[in-house]
Image (cartoon, rainbow, N blue to C red):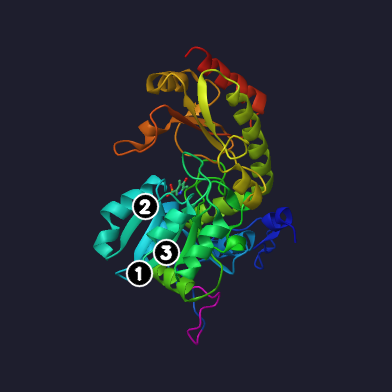
């Protein structure tokens, strides 16, 4: 089955109780057993498993080409559950531009769990090879990365990790399975903040892990979710599933729009660099072409006039909403270093935009007027 068809049909079932075509939302926290004490519908208590969670997981795993999925209350909760499954004494390698929440967790929390970590420029495979230690259990990749849109060679990095006996996790939030399927390139686990494109409408928070295999790692992480409780509410799982049904066409349109915006930004004198993997000027363009079927709807750019000029341009945006996050139908703009706050490693003249479903020419006109005065 082709991806667009899977996105609509994966995990879909007609509700046996009512014939409902749209999925029902069962809010029940507890589930009945028969006289022999066997759970009637296979569920017992909401934190362990529930119908909405199960249906979303059944939809997500085939989209990434995995055998199993686990969904969570947020993208951070999903990533942290994976890290919690590592034995004390493990070493983890993160990209040097990993999503800032995981950088914070690596500094503030993982040491308490006996997990050490280092940060590597994953675009440089020799640097990755040199950083792997005998106790490295997990290599964490994020491509394209946030907010610089750096691209990592997934197959190359996964091969190095595998040789060393380490697992490979890929944060695929920016690309989504529409454009990139890391398991096909050797990943063991794929992470999503479903708050972004999978939900797609800036109105639900969630996270997901998709596992290449239905193996002891999947079982362990599922057990940890059950006992530690990072589960999503049924209504949130329902909203994410609703988003998934339109993911393929949203991503295709938003990605096409982003390419048009990136090309236009490259021609503006106020812009010194555009970070978008779809541009031939991007250092990761060739790798992105090999491992992605489109370049995504996130891009960032640097304002020639520096930090103040970047802040002023953001302030002049009319159509773009000044807000953090990404992946919704409305375009967003932010001065990224301000959003990340103290400790941010983002260049101060950098503006990040999330391209929505508006006509790209309207977005280009807005950016041109916003940058024109700077
Ligand atoms: C937003 C985001 C996360 C964290 O997800 P939440 O749902 O906000 O917890 C992780 N990785 C990337 C790339 C993200 O954009």
- Image quarter in which the N terminus is found: bottom right
Query: What's the distance in space between the residues labelled 1 and 2, CA to CA?
Result: 15 Å
Compared to residue 271, the image places residue 99 above or below, namely below
**Residue where numbered disc 1 is placed:** 135
Front position among marks 3 and 1 = 1
The residue lying toward the viewer, choosing from 233 and 109, is 109
For marks 1 and 2, the one nearer the N-term is 2
- SS at badge 1: loop
Q: Residue furthest top?
A: 373
For marks 2 and 3, the one nearer the N-term is 2
Magenta stretch mostly in which secondary structure? Answer: loop
- Measuring from the top left, give residue 172's x and y in whole percent: 53, 52
- Disc 2 vs disc 3: Cβ atoms closer than 8 Å? no
Ligand 1 within 8 Å, label 3 CB: no
**Residue where numbered disc 2 is placed:** 119
Is residue 191 one of those drawn in magenta?
no
Mark 3 packing: few (<14 Cα in 10 Å), some, or many (20+)? many
- Measuring from the top left, give residue 106's x and y in whole percent: 32, 54
Does the image show residue 44? no
Q: Which residues are magenta?
A: 35-44
- SS at badge 2: strand
Residue 166 is marked as none
**For this view, does 153 lie left or right of residue 30?**
right
Q: Residue at x 73, y 56 (%)?
A: 5
The residue lying toward the viewer, choosing from 159 and 81, is 159
- Disc 1 vs disc 2: Cβ atoms closer than 8 Å? no
**Residue where numbered disc 3 is placed:** 138
Query: What's the distance in space between the residues labelled 3 and 1, CA to CA?
Result: 9 Å
Mark 1 packing: few (<14 Cα in 10 Å), some, or many (20+)? some
């Amino acid at each position: 089955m082709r991806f667009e068809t899977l996105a609509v049909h994966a995990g879909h079932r007609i509700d046996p109780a009512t014939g409902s075509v749209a999925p029902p939302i069962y809010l029940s926290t507890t589930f009945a057993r028969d006289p022999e004490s066997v759970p009637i519908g296979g569920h017992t208590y909401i934190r362990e498993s529930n119908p909405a969670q199960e249906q979303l997981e059944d939809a997500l795993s085939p989209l990434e080409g995995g055998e199993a999925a686990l969904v969570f209350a947020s993208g951070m909760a999903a990533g942290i559950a994976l890290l919690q499954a590592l034995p004390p004494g493990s070493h983890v390698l993160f990209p040097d531009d990993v999503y800032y929440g995981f950088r914070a967790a690596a500094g503030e929390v993982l040491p308490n769990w006996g997990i050490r970590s280092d940060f590597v420029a994953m675009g440089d495979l020799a640097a990755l090879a040199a950083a792997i230690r005998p106790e490295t259990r997990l290599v964490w990749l994020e491509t394209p990365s946030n907010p610089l849109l750096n691209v990592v060679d997934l197959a190359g990095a996964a091969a190095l990790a595998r040789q060393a006996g380490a697992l490979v996790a890929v944060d695929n939030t920016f690309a989504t399975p529409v454009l990139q399927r890391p398991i096909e390139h050797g990943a063991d686990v794929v992470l999503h903040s479903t708050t972004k494109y999978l939900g797609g409408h800036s109105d639900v928070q969630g996270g997901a892990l998709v596992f290449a295999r239905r193996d002891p790692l999947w079982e362990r992480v599922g057990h940890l979710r059950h006992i530690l409780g990072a589960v999503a509410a049924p209504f949130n799982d329902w909203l994410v599933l609703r988003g998934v049904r339109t993911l393929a066409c949203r991503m295709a349109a938003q990605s096409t729009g982003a390419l048009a915006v990136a090309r236009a930004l490259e021609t503006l004198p106020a812009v010194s660099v555009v970070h978008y993997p779809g541009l031939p000027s991007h250092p990761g363009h060739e790798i992105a072409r090999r491992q992605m079927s489109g370049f995504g709807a996130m891009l960032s750019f640097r304002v020639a006039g520096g930090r103040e000029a970047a802040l002023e341009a953001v302030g002049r945006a009319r159509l773009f909403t000044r807000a953090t996050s990404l992946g919704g139908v409305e375009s967003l703009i932010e001065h990224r270093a301000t959003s990340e706050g103290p400790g941010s490693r983002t260049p101060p003249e950098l503006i990040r935009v999330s391209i929505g479903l508006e006509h790209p020419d309207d977005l280009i006109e807005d950016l041109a007027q916003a940058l024109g005065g700077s």
